[in-house]
Image (tube, grey):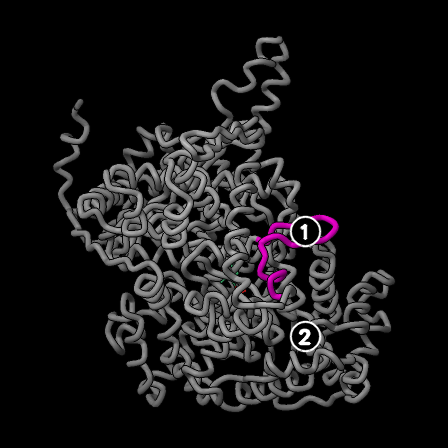
Amino acid sequence: MGTQEQHTRFSPTKAAISLDFAEHLKYSLDADEFHNTDITRYTALAYAIRDRIIHQWHKSRETQRETGSKRVYYLSLEFLMGRAMTNNIINLGLENEVKDAMADLGYAYEELAEVEPDAGLGNGGLGRLAACFLDSLATLDIPSYGYGIRYNYGIFKQQVRNGWQTEQPDNWLRHGNPWEIAREDIIFTVGFGGEVRTLRESGRDQYTWISADQVQGVAYDMPIVGYGGKTVNTLRLWSAKATDEFNFQEFNEGDYVEAVRSKILAENLSQVLYPNDTLYMGKELRLKQQYFFVACSLADIVRRFKRQETSWKELPKFAAIQLNDTHPSLAIPELMRILIDLEHLEWEEAWDITVRTMGYTNHTLMPEALEKWPLTMLESILPRHLQIIFEINHRFLQHAVSFFPLRPQAIERLSIVEEGPSKQIRMANLSIIGSHSTNGVAELHSRLLTERMFPEFSVVFPDRFNNKTNGITQRRWLLDANPLLASKISEAIGDGWITDYERIKDLEPFAEDANFRTDFLTIKQKAKEHAVEFIKKDCGLILRPDSMFDVQVKRIHEYKRQLLNALNIILLYQRIKEGRIQDFSPTTFIFGGKAAPGYVNAKLIIKLINNIAKVINDDSAVRELISVHFLPNYRVTMAERLIPATDLSEQISTAGFEASGTGNMKFMCNGALTIGTMDGATVEMAEEVGRQHMFIFGHSADEIERMRAQYDPYEWITRDPEIRKVMDLFLSGYFNVMEPHIFDPLRQSLLNEDRYFHFADLRSYADSHDEATFLYTNNKDAWAKKAILNIAASGKFSSDRTIMEYANDIWKTRRVPIDRDQSASSTLKAARKK
Ligand SMILES: *Cc1c(COP(=O)(O)O)cnc(C)c1O
């Protein structure tokens, strides 16, 4: 210990960080030489960093308030944040100082950073998008709040036992969370159930919702530090708390235990994230979660607006509310309720304000993923909101009828209420009707939204529909995740790309620079070695860093077609066994991703991949050429290690099903080549770089649609002898010898329907994959050239670009630059009693 001391240079910042770390260790955490663990050390460092954030946080709030600027409110049931520490340190520009400060005390900063659990408050792409957006909003100096739920348990921890996924609770708050501040003074009461009383008052019906149960929401704030450490915005997460006067009656009647039990029930609301990705679940607790966080967030927004002391019609000038999917769509009737029942506005004015304030982002092309709530459930939990929804629907349909005279089916599809034996409330319809903007998340998705999903709406509201192609933050996914590549890029073209990602196109000429290509390959090799080390520590698997890394990491879903990848691996296995393979450099097939716990086929896909892996990895003749690994517990931190190490990125969803994808973009900017279908934003990636620099295969979305009616998987299988043999082997039970029939459900859905067209695309996939392997094996230099061209063409896929488009087209918000103020002289002033 302390041996590194002489190597670090003196800097006042470094010295201050060392001292603050030591003081937090001692005074905040009461750690000494006996009670001092990696957790206390990590926490002390987090506090020392947090101290350097708070001042700019105050200043950002103050400036945004004083300038009376419009704020963006991003409402999302998911924020897949990952770790905060490294990201915050880099955005503050304190990386060297922190490293040196820790080294002076004998610690490796990188090891302390490994202690932090991921904030896994999301499932996949939708939640990670929200996290990337917060980074861009802060870096672009746009006043904004993220609003969500502070789940006590985030996305489950995945373990693999005998090839099967098992789920463990993710108790991420066990050791506390140094990045959050509890705001006990920011607390709202949310009602559920009860009844609506109507009172006729001066010729107008006045409605009062008398709720039966109440829960409180307490704000927990996390700072969102923009790059350069100037703007610090807020992620405000609500935690459910029983009201202080909980079940007063039961209490007095002496049933103390029953009273405490209902207190615990109330606090269930923010216990756990629902682990379904792109599949809705009609669970009552989920609906309550949605209303809970919407009600708290709107109460907070309204409270802030009222400080402006201006009239309600000005609300859209001060607030833009963006709904991340329909999960927060109760914001529409809730704002109407506030304006009409509590603020006594007329319907027309309230509606105009609501529509001008709200924007809705759609995330799916699958009808079964659209949220619908049973009318009876809404009626019993939110009776007043249901009334308002009926009134919205009634008025809307009166307007819409004129567009579709004599077409009752069109009106039926437009209605918020789905008729049938049990009526349902369609939240997407409500969202489109109640907001001034509905956007898809890639060009293809936005086109299909108006053509397939909501054709009637696009007739009624042609100007409301627009596209905002997703993006990712290059700060976390390139600068933080791949420091060697990042500094190589900066060395070549300067570091402007960090905040102006369009500049990345200046890298294009370096594809022709032989030295740069060599350096690129060296950096890729180092990234692989780092990833191999991480994987060994994280899950005990040993990977070969001298092989091609072929990676498919994302939620496990039939439409994402991990099965297509698995079938191609079986095909390669047969070729190897039959000695039919040549020009093949060793390939490591890497899979990762969680299956929703109730999604039987997705869990079976994991089991199949693991069984194939076992057969292949246990066969010494085969494993020299291919090996297969399923990495348990895929999450942001694993993605940050794995993506820089990837050679070939698998983006192979059935065309017309992946709304955008953002994983595809992370791989592109880290110099992986993509094998993929023309789906989601991959279409636009091909447009940017040129399809000749990707491995594009398969049927297009339109071709798939045209094929649907006569598609017969059996025809495609029998037509191609090699594919037939693949299926023969799989169906023979070769990969489940000791486990008969376990894959029957997969076999059935593949052979009977093949909803996702695996067999229509398997031949072109296999051929395309051969092409990739051939190039990688025979011409690494040409591979490197394409990879560099891909990085250079990734400029469009920064979430900074996406956010500027939302800001200009939907939110009409401006940047409010914040000075970085080093002095904290106002500290005493702020503390003085008023
Ligand atoms: C980016 C990301 C996703 C989304 O990946 P897709 O390939 O777009 O589905 C999911 N999970 C994590 C942890 C991510 O970082």
Above or below residue 628? Residue 342 is: above
Q: Which residue is mark 1?
A: 597
**Residue at 49% across, 66% down:** 460
* Residue 274 in picture, x, y percent from top left: 59, 47
**Looking at the image, can residue 539 be seen?**
no
Q: Seen in the image, is 485 located left or right of residue 682?
A: left
Above or below residue 36? Residue 692 is: below
Q: Seen in the image, is 294 located left or right of residue 153?
A: left
* Residue 719 in picture, x, y percent from top left: 79, 89
Q: CA distance from mark 1 to mark 2?
A: 22 Å
Location of the N terminus by quadrant is top left
User: Which of disc 2 and disc 1 is earlier in sequence?
Assistant: 2
**Residue at 69% across, 82% down:** 707
Q: Seen in the image, is 631 located left or right of residue 50?
A: right
Taking the view exactly as shown, the residue that stands out farthest to the front is 203
Nearer to me, 249 or 750: 249
* Residue 635 in picture, x, y percent from top left: 53, 56
Secondary-structure class at tag 2:
helix
Q: Which residue is mark 2?
A: 564
Q: Which residues are magenta?
A: 410-426
Q: Is residue 411 magenta?
A: yes
**Looking at the image, can residue 255 be seen?**
yes
Nearer to me, 647 or 169: 169
**Residue at 73% across, 61% down:** 601
Secondary-structure class at tag 1:
loop
Q: Seen in the image, is 4 located left or right of residue 710?
A: left
Crowding near pointer 1: few (<14 within 10 Å), some, many (20+)? some
In the drawing, what numbered circle is on residue 476? none
Above or below residue 263? Residue 457 is: below
Q: Amino acid at mark 2?
A: Leu
